[in-house]
Amino acid sequence: MLIQIPPSSACREHEVTPESIYLSRRRLLAAAGGLAAMAALPGHAQDPSAYPDVEAAKSPAWFDEKLAGTRWQAVTPGNEAVTPFQDATHYNNFYEFGTNKGDPARNAGQLQIEPWTVRIEGEVGKPGTYSIEDLVKPHGLEERIYRLRCVEAWSMVIPWVGFPLADLLKRVEPTSKAKYVSFETRLAPEEMTGVRSGFSLIDWPYIEGLRLDEAMHPLTILAVGMYGRILPNQNGAPLRLVVPWKYGFKSIKSIVRISLVSEQPATTWQSIAAEEYGFYSNVNPEVDHPRWSQAHERRLPSGLFSPNIVPTRMFNGYDEVASLYTGLDLRKNY
Ligand code: MTE
């Protein structure tokens, strides 16, 4: 599906600073100890030189075949640097593998991702269990550079490779009773040290949900790759949700079940602390978390002595989703 890139978040390829340039700019800044203007150059998922600092990985044939035809569909405004791959893959939240930011990179290698199946069920005309290959086969891949804003007030800019969730949902033919979509992460305690530890408050498996119209919005994607390569396990291989205008915890990883349902699903973080984590969880600088402000965010990389603090934008800057919430009190429906 060719999406219409909406004006508010539209950008052209050459307006995004690729990771390689970002890294060299940081080195230059460090060396010069001052400001240096660098031209932004294009990045392409198909062009390995676009992300030279990326750790190579063996990827399955279904991914390699698709990657060659990836289409550019960036939707992050210009002059924002892509977060270095090292940060995006070593500062993670994936509680199944531990609660420290470095735990997923250390432990998610245990996750068995081959073979992988996804069950699609509930209020659909065509329920079924699909291998990851069959699930992705009908879809052209797109590269989407999106901001990811965590509820913990840090953020990154990540070049995802994926396809619109709407395309998949249309294929399975939602019935008129389908009002919400619920997603479930694989649960395999023998592979997941965080699940085994018993320290977590989470009632596994990790569950997330969207209203059907949010799920059908063209910005909502299912990602299978990032930085022009297959998704690393710690980032949610082989299939994760990316909803760029919502706090990062909505972007559930390593999905094994997608259910179309008539009632709002009980989601993991809402079940733990409903007054802190709402079902909507739209990025909103005016509605603070009960324990911290949401007005600003720490854009990674951001060190103690070189903090990179930027203002948080309504809907994470993706204003084109505002019409989904017309008439809804966003303070009450946080
Ligand atoms: N999905 C699962 N299954 N388990 C998790 O703990 N953490 C969420 C989300 N998806 C999480 C998850 C949170 S809190 C965030 S901010 C993002 O993943 C982080 O994605 P990243 O590690 O790829 O940056």
Image (cartoon, rainbow, N blue to C red):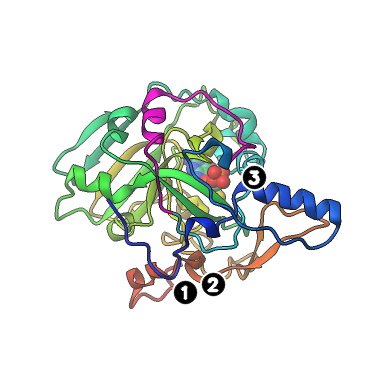
Q: Is residue 9 left or right of residue 123?
A: right
Q: Residues within 10 Å of mark 2 (few under 14, many from 20)?
A: some
Q: Nearer the viewer, mark 2 or mark 3?
A: 3
CA distance for labels 3 and 1: 40 Å
Is 174 situated above or below 228?
below
Q: Amino acid at mark 3?
A: Ser
Residue 20 is labelled as: 3
| Residues tagged 1 and 2 counted as in contact (Cβ below 8 A) | yes
Residue 27 is labelled as: none
What stretch of residues is rendered in magenta?
51-73
Viewer-nearest residue: 233 or 317: 317
Residue 93 placement (x, y as % from top left): 58, 44
- The main secondary structure of the magenta stretch is loop
First in sequence: mark 1 or mark 2? 2
- Judge whether residue 202 can be spotted in this image: no
Q: Where on the picture, by quarter, is residue 98?
A: top right
In the rendered image, which residue does mark 1 sit on?
331
| Residues tagged 2 and 3 counted as in contact (Cβ below 8 A) | no
Q: Is residue 285 left or right of residue 24?
A: left
Residue 301 placement (x, y as % from top left): 70, 51
Viewer-nearest residue: 295 or 218: 218
| Residues tagged 3 and 1 counted as in contact (Cβ below 8 A) | no
Q: Nearer the viewer, mark 3 or mark 1?
A: 3
First in sequence: mark 3 or mark 1? 3
